[in-house]
Amino acid sequence: MGINKYDFNEKNILKFDSNEHELAIATKNLQVFYGDNHALFDGDLEFERYRITSLIGASGSGKSTYLRSLNRMNDNVARVEGEIQYRGLNVNSKKINVYEMRKHIGMVFQRPNPFSKSIRENITFALKEQGLKNKKKLEEIVESSLKDAALWDEVKDDLNKSAWSLSGGQQQRLCIARTIAMKPDILLLDEPASALDPISTSKIEETLVELKKRYTIIIVTHNMQQASRISDYTAFFHLGHILEYDKTKHIFTTPKVTATNDYISGNFG
Ligand SMILES: Nc1ncnc2c1ncn2[C@@H]1O[C@H](COP(=O)(O)OP(=O)(O)OP(=O)(O)O)[C@@H](O)[C@H]1O
């Protein structure tokens, strides 16, 4: 039987070759339409592996639209044209198995949304659905995911407690752990700290900086300090266009586009 190139099976998709600057994911001419509203034009970006990229820009500039397209969260909501290139596959192909693809490209949302289950079950639920039954293996993944999300020390003695009994910041780290448990390559985060207090926010930031050793992270944020603190690259969105994309330090010190400079210095938006 020939290889089905739309099949998101580990043996069918291209291996990363461990170049220092290899790409994790790229978009070519990505366009998004909500009915007649052309919300994203010419979305061309390349994301380096093991880096954090921030997507910044005023409200309504298309950041979430772009981010959500990367793992097909806009299916049934918007028309998305163009290519999303990931390890030899076009994620935007209608033939892609979206469920399998999301194990590789996971998303964490703005508001923490843990399941109404125990802390442990939040991690194990999807793994069990996938057919993983080995208790020891499941426990190992619970521990490693919670450690990766910097939550283990706070919950390790209470894994049967309801996830909803955790603080907002802890719930968000649990949602990160739940996503990591699927062992994705790429973590998409849509303003993951906007509903959190400064201490929880700084914990999330520390967690993300630690996670980039093993994951490629793309984050939408309205918090300019956050973008400059944690991200390696920054893309500036304006009225549905990506106006500037560069190393974060260049965007924040020597932007080439006037609109970028106006936005980061608070002159509009
Ligand atoms: N589900 C939707 N249905 C219809 N239009 C939408 C939908 N989501 C976003 N839009 C429109 O797409 C455009 C871009 O919105 P988007 O949410 O991507 O911007 P954003 O930069 O992420 O904004 P914010 O920072 O406020 O989250 C806006 O005109 C918005 O009204």
Image (cartoon, grey):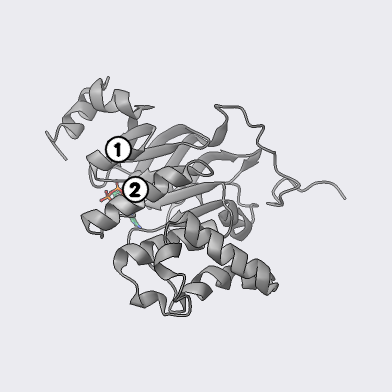
Q: Is residue 184 left or right of residue 222?
A: right
Residue at the image point whose x is 13% and y is 36% from the top: 266
Residue at the image point whose x is 37% and y is 41% from the top: 40
Q: Are marks 2 and 1 in contact (CB under 8 Å)?
A: yes
* Residue at disc 1, secondary structure: helix
- Residue 138: x and y, percent? 63, 69
* Residue under label 1: 229
Ligand 1 neighbours mark 1 (CB distance < 8 Å): no
Q: Residues within 10 Å of mark 2 (few under 14, many from 20)?
A: some
Q: Amino acid at mark 1?
A: Arg
- Residue 48: x and y, percent? 50, 32
In the displayed structure, 27 sits above or below 170; it is: above
- Residue 131: x and y, percent? 69, 71
* Residue under label 2: 205
The tag earlier along the polypeptide, 2 or 1, is: 2
* Residue at disc 2, secondary structure: helix
Q: Amino acid at mark 2?
A: Glu
- Could you say which is closer to the camera, residue 200 or residue 242? 200
- Residue 185: x and y, percent? 56, 46
- Could you say which is closer to the camera, residue 267 or residue 223? 223
